[in-house]
Amino acid sequence: GRRDNIYKARIKILVHELGIEKFAVEVDEEWQQMKSDALVIDDDVVEDIRSRFFYPAYEKLPHNPEELKKAAQDQKFEAWRKNSTFAHKAPGYAIVTISLKPVGAPPGDATAEQMDALADLADKYSFGEIRVGHEQNLALPHVARRDLPALWKALDRLGLATPNVNLVSDIIACPGLDYCSLANARSIPIAQELTRRFANHDTANLIGRLHINISGCINACGHHHVGHIGILGVEKNGEEFYQITIGGRADESAELGALIGPAVPYGEVADVVEDIVEAYLALRASPDELFVDTVKRLGVEPFRERVYATR
């Protein structure tokens, strides 16, 4: 249980700090003291940790300011707002996710000029704070809702207002063979091609939430094993092939994806993903059923049949 995990972690720390000769006695003594007691953190320790974190000086702001009402008439802005802004616990504020997944570009990439501009936008609109997520996107966590139209215009000028957060083109990919000496296969070009295949925002919204994760080798830096669709690059006789898994997820119901069949060559990966998505659209119980839930309900076989019927 949790106690055992803490015990093992403590062993690793002591091995590093004290060396193999000394750690055994230290750990055993500590374990004897704690193994039958409840794990309790003193209130003063909790308070000390809490004191290190500060909330910004939020203003009292309306939830639906006039600036937002006026901007809502712009369909392009509304598409971005609905996709890339999220609820904030402080009234009148929003969390803004900045997609680094424009069509045809490497996932998670940004130029020096874009980063300089983002730093200025964070100072102006988000109390100087930017957060980086494992999804290879950025977030401005404290944006006044009245400032969303102005922020969107600034992001749009920078090419950073793609409204595809959590959609099929919001792909996680490792550097792959283009930049990593450990990789067996390319990752970035596959991600770029998939963003082109699913560039139409209406189509992406029809598909709904769908996470594609790509790793160029078994080290799994792209977390392919927990992608709704996972793509793993492997090497076969000097050529790039890719294993495809479906049904993985990294939420509260975390699960590893299941292999749908034999690996496919580099040139067929985007076609296979399209086949899987088309099968999902035909098989889902309703437009509200997410891809990963359809896979859980039906299993892998219907998707395997669709992918390998002509291969």
Image (cartoon, rainbow, N blue to C red):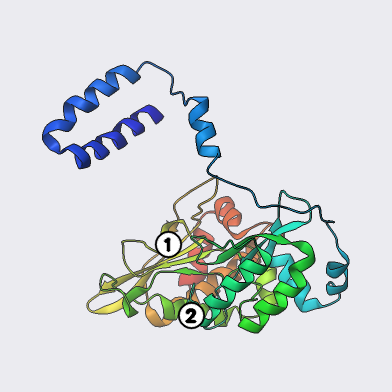
Answer yes or no: is residue 262 visible. Answer: yes
In front of the other: 58 or 24:
58
- Dot 2 corresponds to which residue? 112
Q: Quadrant of the C terminus?
A: bottom left
Dot 2: element: helix
Task: Determine whether 222 is above or below 161 in the image.
Answer: above
Of label 1 and label 2, which has the lower sequence position? 2
- Dot 1 corresponds to which residue? 224
Q: Amino acid at mark 2?
A: Ala
Rendering coords of residue 15 (x, y %)? 20, 38
Q: Amino acid at mark 1?
A: His
Query: Is residue 235 toward the left or the right of residue 80 in the image?
Result: left
Rendering coords of residue 229 (x, y %)? 49, 64
Q: Quadrant of residue 17?
A: top left
Q: Quadrant of the N terminus?
A: top left
In front of the other: 199 or 265:
199
Rendering coords of residue 54 (x, y %)? 60, 47
Q: Quadrant of residue 161?
A: bottom right
